[in-house]
Image (cartoon, helix red, strand yellow):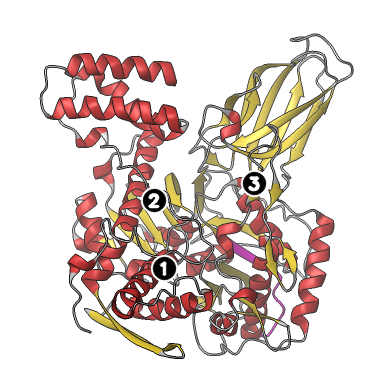
């Protein structure tokens, strides 16, 4: 049976993968060397041509200045001058490569172009269509940048699919045999990003009900910890500080990645580093306990994100922690042996309920390929955003084996009002696709042109959130404040892309926009970039892809805090100790439970000075409760007063 020529792509931070449906099963598309993943690395060969994948990764040590890694972390990012006026979104972040500045989506387009070529080699025919996965926590700008990258690579984006949803499909969500609803957590720890979602599954239906994550947490950070530890040992034993040399850092990091994988099956490994300098060769032993101690605080951060996703699911859908039946492991970093028991203990599950029975490197790509089988095939690149007739949420599946996929927004979407207030239109965890309309808006007076500023985030102060777009409104004439009345409508399509509409209730005039913020590429730029990418890659052939124990007392407290950082990376600020969650504290008086829960949530949304005040009041009250102090009531009243003052 011929292949269904819509590929599923897991566009990862450190590695990417592809799959395709042959009518019976989903196949991972292998590279010429037989690897099932392709490094998400872009570099230059000796002739100055762009190379992608394993050849670029191999050049990283020798030519770090002309090699780009982990570009996914920079997708949809813009840099704003702190002195810029409110409403200025800043400028798109760019990456220096080949002697010019590239948008991150242009670098991603090189990777997608190479994946497209490999798929065409596998199938033997042109490929024009793809389902591409993105982290569930990706914001509007990041999703839009991913779509831009695909169009630059001449791919029609049939769907942007959340990674946990793809994983759920691959784990067999469409094979639920009973009629009840099952609840799972998807724990996706990849090479550069962490994504966690709470999903509910019933026959023929997968719904995301809670999300969380950290765009800068993953296996690459674990490699940096090992690298810093090795440099620390070299300084201690040989008196040489090599942490400022980018080439040495990358060489050690590459070795660290391989030994990290070795520790998934062994209790000890040795980093062999001959001739780091002309006079220095070292062998540094690394045991599994030392490695786990080095990354413990990073794994604790992942548990914090998991708890946030569970709380999100509880608030939006009433799902309690003990309703989670299983955890689905996704991402190569979940192979670290301590992760499964850590999650089992944290959620009160048995070890068998922490599932890793499908390769964590392939599960998202396979799920994307399974969704892609239901997408239409185009005869060529259509040169525009693809409009697909998605089934309405809750409608029966169109064909046997088809799934209804229901995602939710990972961030609140809203607009600016009253000069600084953030007015939510689509709250966090709203259904996708979905729409919401809100009225009660009026003009400020004295202006004929009004700019509706669109934000994404959770802070009640608008400019503390991400400005993701503007919608200009030209009124018939300037009138006094309150003369014009408006209602604002937000709608999200199945890919999570936003459309905004403003209606003037005075005369029925409507203004609308497909959100196009400054980090998105214009159509002209997409066409120019596509031509450039084709030119610099056209002459390149397709990729042929090319212990003794250590005393734990030597580790810095807390683990990893004092290790050297990659050259050019700013030093990390010391994080305050996390506040105890209300659910962890017994004996809170009933009259204070609500304000304690709400204060715990508000702390992270406040500016630093107010955050410190509320955290201090919260901590003092919790300490009094735990010690059964007679001051509980007074401290509770003080916390309540401060909460209502700061909220």
Give the residue drawn at x 24%, y 60%: 353
Which mark, residue 116?
Answer: none
Q: At numbered mark 1, what does the secondary structure look like: helix, strand or loop?
A: helix
Q: Residues within 10 Å of mark 2 (few under 14, many from 20)?
A: many
Determine whether, in the image, residue 498 is placed left or right of residue 180.
Answer: right
Label 2 – label 1 distance at C-alpha: 37 Å
Counting the numbered discs, the total is 3
The stretch of residues the image draws in magenta is 124-133
Residue matched to label 2: 201
Does 299 appear above or below 616?
below
Pick the quarter of the image with the N terminus. Answer: bottom right
Report which quarter residue 49 is drawn in: bottom right
Which mark, residue 224?
Answer: 1
Q: At numbered mark 3, what does the secondary structure look like: helix, strand or loop?
A: loop
Q: Can you tell which of label 3 and label 1 is closer to the viewer?
A: 1
Give the residue drawn at x 65%, y 49%: 78
Q: At numbered mark 2, what does the secondary structure look like: helix, strand or loop?
A: strand
Residues 512 and 482: in front is: 482
Q: Residue 71: give x, y in percent of width and height.
A: 59, 64
Determine whether, in the image, residue 505 is placed left or right of residue 181.
Answer: right
Give the residue drawn at x 34%, y 86%: 282
Q: Earlier in the sequence, mark 2 or mark 1?
A: 2
Does 200 appear above or below 377?
above
Residue matched to label 3: 497
């Amino acid at each position: 049976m011929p292949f269904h020529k819509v590929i599923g792509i897991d566009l990862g931070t450190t590695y990417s993968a592809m799959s395709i449906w042959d009518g019976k099963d989903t196949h991972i598309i292998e590279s010429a060397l037989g690897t099932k993943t392709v490094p998400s690395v872009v570099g230059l060969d000796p002739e100055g041509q762009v190379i992608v994948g394993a050849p670029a990764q191999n050049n990283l040590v020798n030519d770090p200045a002309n090699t780009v890694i982990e570009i996914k972390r920079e997708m949809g990012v813009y840099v704003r001058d702190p002195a810029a006026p409110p409403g200025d979104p800043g400028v798109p972040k760019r990456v220096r490569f080949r002697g010019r500045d590239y948008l991150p989506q242009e670098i991603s387009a090189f990777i997608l172009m190479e994946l497209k070529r490999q798929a065409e080699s596998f199938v033997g025919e042109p490929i024009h269509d793809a389902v591409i996965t993105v982290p569930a926590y990706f914001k509007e700008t990041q999703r839009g940048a991913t779509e831009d990258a695909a169009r630059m690579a001449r791919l029609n984006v049939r769907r942007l699919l959340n990674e946990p949803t793809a994983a759920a499909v691959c784990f067999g969500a469409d094979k639920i045999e009973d009629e009840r609803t099952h609840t799972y957590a998807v724990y996706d720890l990849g090479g550069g990003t962490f994504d966690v979602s709470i999903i509910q599954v019933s026959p023929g239906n997968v719904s995301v009900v809670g999300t969380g994550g950290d765009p800068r947490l993953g296996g690459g950070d674990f490699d940096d910890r090992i690298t810093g530890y090795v440099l620390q040992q070299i300084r201690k034993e040989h008196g040489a500080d090599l942490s400022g040399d980018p080439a040495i850092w990358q060489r050690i990091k590459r070795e660290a990645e391989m030994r990290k994988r070795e520790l998934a099956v062994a209790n000890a490994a040795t980093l062999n580093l001959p001739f780091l300098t002309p006079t220095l060769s070292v062998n540094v032993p690394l045991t599994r306990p030392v490695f786990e101690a080095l990354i413990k605080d990073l794994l604790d951060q992942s548990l914090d994100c998991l708890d946030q996703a569970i709380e999100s699911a509880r608030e939006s859908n009433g799902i309690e922690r003990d309703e989670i039946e299983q955890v689905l492991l996704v991402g190569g970093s979940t192979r670290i042996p301590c992760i499964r028991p850590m999650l089992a203990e944290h959620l009160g599950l048995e070890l068998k309920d922490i599932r890793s029975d499908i390769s964590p490197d392939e599960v998202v790509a396979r799920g994307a390929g399974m969704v892609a089988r239901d997408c239409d095939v185009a005869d060529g690149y259509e040169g525009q955003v693809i409009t697909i007739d998605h089934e309405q949420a809750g409608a029966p599946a169109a064909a046997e084996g088809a799934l209804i996929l229901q995602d939710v927004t990972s961030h609140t979407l809203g607009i600016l009002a009253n000069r600084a207030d953030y007015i939510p239109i689509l709250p966090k965890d709203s259904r996708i696709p979905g729409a919401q309309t809100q009225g009660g808006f009026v003009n400020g007076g004295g202006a004929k042109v009004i700019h509706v500023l669109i934000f994404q985030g959770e802070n009640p102060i608008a400019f503390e959130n991400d400005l993701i777009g503007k919608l200009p409104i030209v009124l018939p004439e300037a009138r006094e404040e309150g003369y014009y009345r408006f209602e604002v409508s937000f709608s999200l399509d199945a890919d999570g892309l936003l459309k905004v509409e403003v209606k003037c209730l005075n005369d029925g005039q409507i203004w609308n926009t497909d959100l196009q913020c400054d980090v998105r590429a214009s159509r002209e730029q997409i066409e120019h970039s596509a031509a450039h990418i084709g030119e610099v890659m056209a002459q390149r052939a397709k990729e042929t892809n090319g212990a003794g124990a250590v005393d734990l007392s030597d580790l810095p407290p807390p683990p990893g805090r004092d290790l050297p950082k990659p050259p050019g990376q700013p030093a990390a600020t010391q994080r305050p100790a996390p506040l105890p969650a209300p659910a962890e504290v017994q004996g809170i008086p009933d009259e204070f439970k609500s304000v304690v829960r709400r204060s715990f949530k508000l702390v992270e949304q406040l500016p630093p000075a107010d955050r410190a005040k509320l955290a201090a009041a919260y901590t003092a009250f919790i300490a009094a409760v735990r010690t059964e102090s007679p001051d509980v009531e007074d401290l509770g009243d003080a916390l309540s007063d401060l909460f209502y003052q700061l909220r």
